[in-house]
Image (cartoon, grey):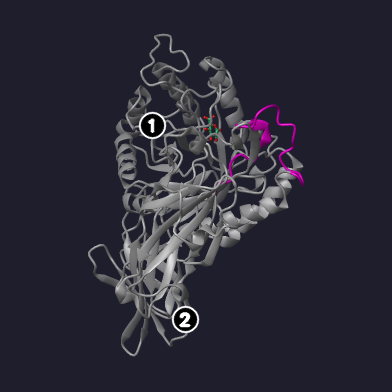
Amino acid sequence: MLRPQDTRTRERRSLDGLWRFRLDGAGEGRAQRWFAAPLEQYRLMAVPASFNDIVADPDVRDYAGELWYQTTARVPRGWDGSRVVLHLESATHRATVWVGDTEVVSHEGGYTPFEADVTEHVRAGELVRITVCVDNRLSFETIPPGLVVQTPRGPRQRWFHDFYNYAGIHRHVWLSSTPTTWVDDVTVVTGLEGSVGTVAYDVEVRGTAAYDVAATLRDGTGAVVATGTGASGTLRVEDVHRWAPGDGYLYELEVRLEHDGAVLDSWLQPVGVRTVEVRGTEFLVNGEPFHFRGFGKHEDAAVIGRAHSDAYLLRDFELLRWIGANSFRTSHYPYSEDVLDLADREGIVLIDEVAAVGLHFGLGGSIPGPPGRTTFSAETINGTTQAVHAQAIRELVARDKNHPCVVLWSIANEPESETAAAEEYFRPLFDVAREADPTRPVGFVNVALAPHGTCRVSQFGDVIMLNRYYGWYVHTGDLDAAELAWEQELRGWAGDGKPIIVTEYGADTLAGLHSLAAEPWSEEYQVAYLDMNHRVLDRIPAVVGEHVWNFADFATAPGVMRVGGNRKGVFTRDRQPKAAAHALRRRWLVAPAE
Ligand code: GCB
């Protein structure tokens, strides 16, 4: 599946805007065929947006169940004879889609795209009704997992992770046209041989017409630098301009299907020529040691929730540049493809994460009362969950494999990892990731409850990724004790001979709260906490990355540990700096480490 594109043979029409929207608390929409007529008793809803923070009604905000979205669109007149595709970049957490009265596709998983060939169900020039039934519920057999509980106000969603369960249609929806013989997938793998760049491409085609495949690689000025023929091949670029952190140089590969001098289809694939390799305790990009400086982030903002916004995207990248960050992790789910496109262009490096977060009942999350359940069992996280997880990995790799910005796959955040059940659950998932993409390293993020010497999953990773809160959740307010304990644990990990990326360290901080004694929650404490962490990290050569938690404050479930959400942001939720942002800028931009 390729994202819709405008090329000389393809067009796309955005279906973003105001859709009809209706909750289905009684679960009757399917039986009553709400898709088969204009949706009644509706309110308007923005697409893309999370629905939760738009409606001024707490019962809507916290609703758990099926949600109906509907719009009508006119199929462009010029599309007669084309293949027509309906493409949703995401629907959280699952969806069923009808075009007119016909069900065309269902999809599980809230953060990857899906589409349906709807050619048979539409006519060029005519209006078509599109209905999407979104389900925002999480269970033990979803990624991420959750639990629906009954409350006096109706069913409510509980979950094991630390961010609000925003849901809805979070990204663009497209109606698009392609030729009836079309480029269905393109895979690009790049390499370096001295000053020569190699671009191996592989094209999948569908349809019945006769065709030849032609490939043309152009540089940033549009000049042709290499050409090839055939569905797969390797192009060579003399004096290649490498894609590198901070230098997001992109070539463009045009893949054409040709017949008798006519172009049947044309697909444009941006290409950044770079290599990624783990060697000993080093993480190499283009053969040179790379040190990750940046954040764990969220797609999170007031009003729009988890929706994609070009404005927030640009603001966040401005701030990354301002602070001297070179990378971030798409914690804790795949982000909008617009984010990856911009990271490619800006030379920002990404750790790309599957939405497998909260696979650890020892952490509690928003589940009331003592957990009383084991994480992995037939009744909880089980073989079905594992199959859904494997599919989520495959869909992430299929979507993001051609992005030079992605240098590492993270297949889970803070799962239980010290048990035999965890080892058994994760071993095959590493294989799934490596089979889907043999070219990039794979890892998972280890939790403090499985410290060095006890974790049974780290053995499978190419890198060690650690979330640690010495000085916050442990040794709270005692940075001296925290420094000793942290260094001791980190030295243990360093002995494993793999590169270590500290994927989370952070302290909740209320912007504007000051304390001369640098007490927890104050801006002074966040600065002192980060300083302590950096002293420790700088002493351990195997540490190749520092990602502060979090880039910005974000919404969570209510709880005694959270004051208006998680406040570990270095920026506030509206993207203004706390004192720690200035301190990080001094470390990363003014006097960056080697
Ligand atoms: C973690 C989680 C992250 C939380 C963070 C915290 O380890 O990975 O999702 O938000 O801790 O602030 O507690």
Q: Which residue is mark 2?
A: 207
Residue closer to the observer: 110 or 517 = 110
Residue sitting at 59 percent across and 42 percent down? 497
**Residue at the far top in the pictured view:** 517
Residue 500 in view: yes
Does residue 221 sit above or below 265 in this rendering? above
* Quadrant housing the C terminus: top left
Q: Amino acid at mark 1?
A: Arg
Q: Classify mark 2 as within 8 Å of ligand 1 or not, answering yes or no.
A: no
Q: Which residues are magenta?
A: 354-379
Dividing the picture into quadrants, the one containing residue 174 is: bottom left
Label 2: few (<14), some (14–19) or many (≥20) C-alpha neighbours in 10 Å = few
Q: Indicate yes or no whether the magenta region holds residue 358.
A: yes
Q: Which residue is mark 1?
A: 573
Residue sitting at 34 percent across and 32 percent down? 574
In the image, taking residue 311 as reference, residue 90 lies left or right, namely right
In the image, taking residue 314 as reference, residue 4 lies left or right, namely right
Residue closer to the observer: 291 or 264 = 264
Does residue 269 sit above or below 418 in this rendering? below
Residue 226 point in image, percent of width and height: 32, 73
Residue 341 point in image, percent of width and height: 36, 54
Residue 401 in view: no
